[in-house]
Image (spheres, grey):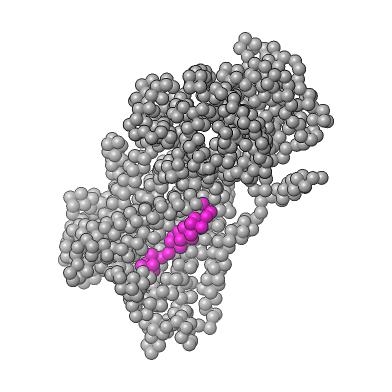
Amino acid sequence: MSEATAANGQAKARKSSGRPSAWKLLMNNKLAATGLWVLLAIAALAILVPVLPLPDPNVTEPADRLFPPLTEGHFLGTDHLGRDIFSRLLWGTQVSIAVGLSATVIAAVFGSLIGLVAGYVGGRTDNLMMRGIDMLMAFPYILLALAIVAALGPGLLNALYAIAIVNIPFFARNIRGITLGLKHREFVDAARLSGKSHVGVLFTEVLPNVLPVIVITMSTTVGWMILETAGLSFLGLGAQPPQADLGSMLGEGRKLLFTAPHVSFVPGLMIFLLVMSINLLGDGVRDVLDPRLKSGALAAPSARTAIDRDVVPEVEANPDRVLDVKALSTHFDVGDQVYKAVGGVDFYLGETECLGLVGESGSGKSVTAMSLAGLVPTPPGVIKGGRVMFEGADLLEVSDADLRGIRGRDIAYVFQDPLSTLHPLFPVGDQIAEAVRAHQPVSKQVAWDRAVELLDLVRIPNAAERAKAFPHEMSGGMRQRVSIAMALANDAKVLVADEPTTALDVTVQAQVLKLMDQLRRDKNAAVLFITHDFGVVSEICDRIAVMYAGRIVETGPTDAVLKSPAHPYTRMLIDCVPVMGQPGRRLDAIAGLPPPVNDLPDGCAFAERCPHATSECRKGDIGLGPLGEGREVRCIHPLKETVL
Amino acid sequence: MAGYIVKRLLAMIPVLIGLSIIVFLIMAMIPGDPAQAILGNFATPENVARVNRELGLDKPLPQQYLIWVTNLLQGDFGRSYILNRPVLDEVLERFSATLILAGTSLVLCSIFGLLAGIVSAVRQFGWIDRTVTFFVLIGISMPSFWLGLLLILVFAVQWRVLPASGMFAIYGGGDLLDLARHLILPALTLAVVATGVIARLTRASMLEVLRQDYVRTARAKGLSERKVIYRHAFKAALVSVIPVIGIQAGFVLGGAVYIETVFQWPGIGAMLVKAISTRDILLVQGGVLVVAASYVLFNLIADVVQSLLDPRLKS
């Protein structure tokens, strides 16, 4: 057993052990764990305060006024009435936590009820309830609480109600959303059909499923509620003397800010620690219960694919080749898995030649194309080997600045699905003009005029007007023309077209293909044309390279390959293409799936699905062997017959 | 665009009606005789009867509401019997001071929040990102009224470089420079929480956008990273940050209550707190209505800005 397979087995064993428990996940999050411990320590002190050997928090002792912290017998000193601050702090913390938690529970109960009913009943009830909730949210947060306290009168209990009411909308909205989604699920229907009442369904079927959301909303709002009730007390609208919570202690201490700052500093610090530990824990709980909400956890791709080459082959200079790719391999490192998306690819582009790179989705053709100009996102992509020779330089070695100069000027891309590849917020003319100005020192006006010319060139009617349109205002075919125009902005020597016609319907597809074919001839550009469609290949490509599981399995002139495919995989792909006038022909999808590129078999990757496979096919590395004029095939049993 | 703004302005009307109903109902919750509450404990029975008549408090609730709203629309917000002046005059005077403070804070938190968010997204997992994340965490957990006290201690008491309270110096002040000096501490304090929220959201939104295909297109064109990030990615991220800035306007307006109390800023927040403790109900009512209505307007502006950035939203 090789080391690789051993590691593989280990990885599988780890996978089968399943997802770690929620508790473990929470504890793995260092910040959340810190928050939990701090919170537990504070809560323990607050709960134990009645039995701790501390002075009575409300006994005044005028002789002991304003002792500084660390005074004998008064750990945190005394306030203006000679009361022990440490004792008052712990009692005040108890009150603040109790009030904050109560407000949270009240808001959660009423808010969730409103959300559940509104979401489940729907219709008018929903409309009316949610309008009411929207109205509450139209108030600045604390202002509404102030208005309520104004009506009810200052006092800790009234402050509690006010803060709870103000937070009801957050619960109502979140819970309603989830309930709406659950309402028409099978298990709810089943419970209804089994004769349960609406109320029964709501509380036994729906409620358990919205519980995680209630917990998340509680954990993210409880910190706020403690902070806001403390705030109301600070303003003198909450706890009234002699009762004290953290906020009122801070409010009283404020009057002594200049003479005895510790009286206000201590309770403020406690509020801060309490709220921060709750927020840390709340974020952790949210990430565990609903990982989708975890924001910014995924890494953003860097400007250029990371390069970490193990293999750097020698490449002889060949002036006939515009682009010469040798042993290119690009991997995706995800966790402990390595996906060999491109596993050693060789191809070249002659001057003004069009090479079709063909394969199923997932075969690595797009990653190959993106690797050329370092456009594979890192993480997780890494170029692990090979060379990309262009005009005597290896694109994997040039500086970032040089690569930027080559991108869009010498090598230009036309992407699939221009709705997502064009910027939605800039007019198309702007985007083309920007491509012009990226490489040509011209004024904005000149670049704009050039953009209009280019749009005209790709036959967009009324180009001067349409240049001002946004991508979403155009049809799919028009958008694709825009992205072709953008690729032509600097008369690139190499065009890389990644499935440029896949998202289009058939008639538009034909128009766009014809346009591309003509333009590349007019502009003398070499084209790397990526597609899964042999029908498209035969229209435009001079040569073909067929990819399977990250490697090229057959390459040669288009006519020759189409007429007599040598690799069984090529043959099967060709058989998938419907032919006009042969309605009887069977369109077989190829049975089976390509092997996962993180677990490639020994030998030929296609052997599993190949009718001609022998035991030899599953051994060692099978190379790309020559097969007649300009053709190569990666197969030890190449086919000999010709297709009709 | 003009049509869109008019449409949005019209949509404000039901919201404003809703706001007024809620404020009205909250005041109807007042236990006991509202006229007594308005006039205070030492009011004569004649005066109580007069106020009851003036406010229509002897009539059924819906009719009371209509009378009240009709008065509001004529600019009659009632009279503060404690200050002995029309509520609207007092509210507008105080509100202008709050706008200066809250507006400055909103500008500060937008600038700092957006910058911090962008930088930490671009340097994801680097030390800048970790520092920003750390300060964001502290910022959103910080009781602003405590932070205000700390800043006063450091800048006004220890270093004596900035004034601790007020809007203008009592003697010899009154110019813009004087206002700016008084504004620095309260505006900064008020901006801290909102800065944290905006920074956090900008970071998440930038990271989301940087993964989009059109950012790859921008790179494929050969644009510099600066253009890719500040022109292409930032513009798209801003679309989802703008509404949050609108919401922060509400938190800043509300938070002004604390900050104005701490720094004795003569704004509407400090006025409300005082009015609540003196049970000056009509003043509270008027103040809350004006601030809430201005918040609705802020959100409308945020919506309009958002649709200016993203033409897809107008349809």
Depth check, front residue: B178 or A539: A539
Percent x, y for residue B6?
Answer: 27, 38
Left or right of B173? Residue A242 is right
| Main secondary structure found in the magenta portion | helix
For the point 18% across and 54% down, the residue is B76
Percent x, y for residue A602?
Answer: 77, 36
Q: In this view, does A464 lie above or below B116?
A: above
For the point 50% across and 35% down, the residue is A406
Q: Which residue lies furthest to the bottom in this view?
A: A63
Depth check, front residue: A502 or B69: A502
Q: In this view, does B182 lie above or below A337?
A: below
Q: Quadrant of the N terminus of chain B?
A: top left
* Residue A487 in sight: yes
* Residue B312 in sight: no
Percent x, y for residue A30?
Answer: 58, 61
Depth check, front residue: B119 or A313: A313
Q: Is residue A260 above or below residue A496?
A: below
Residue B137: in magenta span: yes
Query: In this picture, which residue range is highlighted in magenta?
Result: B124-149
Q: Residue furthest top?
A: A581
Quadrant position of residue A621: top right
For the point 54% across and 68% down, the residue is A38
Residue B253: in magenta span: no
For the point 71% across and 16% down, the residue is A564
Depth check, front residue: A318 or B215: A318
Q: In which quarter of the image is the C terminus of chain B?
A: top left
